[in-house]
């Protein structure tokens, strides 16, 4: 019968013990980072309005609903995201009003939001590029809502 305790020197047993502790800690830290990375940043949970004047290089910029410096516009699209998983997208309706689409979001990875809508409205996937107090910059990865 093979027994490590009797065949290894005390110094080698100590090295193996240290390595096993380090591996355990490394695995635990990796799991902690994985679980926390699936939560979007806290500041995302609010009502955002598209500030299309600030869009740049394929990125879209949104401002909080309370933002006061929007120039005049015939309408602005936006969305509201809640901690409980609810997502509402606001689109410009044919009559220049707004129409809303309800869905549920999830975050499969750091800075990524995937939304599935009720009914025939297609999915929406975007990445958070930059998030400030009243400014959000995103990159749409997939959108069947146009």
Image (cartoon, rainbow, N blue to C red):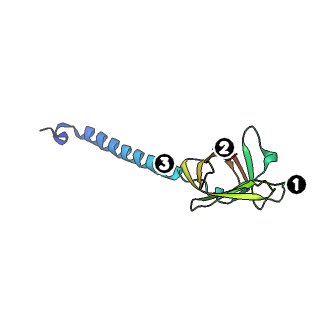
Residue at the right extreme, as displayed:
72
- Dot 1 or dot 3, earlier in sequence: 3
Question: The C terminus appears in which quarter of the rendering?
Answer: top right
* Pointer 2 local density, CA inside 10 Å: few below 14, some 14–19, many at least 20: some
- Label 3, on which residue? 34
Give the mark nearer the N terminus: 2 vs 3. Answer: 3
Instruction: Give me the residue at 84% from left, 55% from top.
Output: 70
Indicate which disc, 2 or 1, sits on the residue closer to the N terminus: 1
Label 3 sits on a secondary structure element that is helix
Is disc 2 in contact with disc 3, using a CB cutoff of under 8 Å? no
The residue located at (64%, 59%) in the rendering is 45
Residue drawn at 70 percent across, 53 percent down = 132
Closer to viewer: mark 1 or mark 3: 1
Give the image quarter of residue 89. Answer: bottom right
Towards the viewer: 106 or 128: 106
The label shown at residue 10 is none
How far is disc 2 from disc 3 in space, using C-alphas?
Answer: 23 Å
State the CA–CA distance, disc 2 to disc 1.
25 Å
């Amino acid at each position: 019968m093979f027994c490590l305790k009797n065949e290894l020197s005390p110094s080698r047993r100590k090295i193996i013990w240290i390595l096993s502790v380090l591996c355990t800690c490394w695995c635990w830290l990796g799991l902690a980072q994985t679980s926390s990375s699936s939560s979007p940043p806290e500041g995302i949970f609010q009502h955002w309005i598209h500030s299309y004047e600030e869009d740049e290089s394929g990125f879209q910029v949104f401002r909080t609903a309370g933002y006061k410096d929007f120039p005049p516009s015939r309408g602005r699209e936006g969305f509201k995201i809640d901690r409980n998983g609810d997502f509402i997208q606001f689109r410009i309706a044919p009559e220049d009003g707004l129409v809303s689409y309800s869905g549920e979001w999830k975050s499969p990875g750091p800075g990524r939001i995937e939304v599935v809508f009720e009914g025939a409205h297609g999915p929406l996937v975007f990445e958070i590029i930059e998030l400030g107090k009243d400014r959000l910059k995103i990159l749409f990865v997939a959108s069947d809502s146009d």
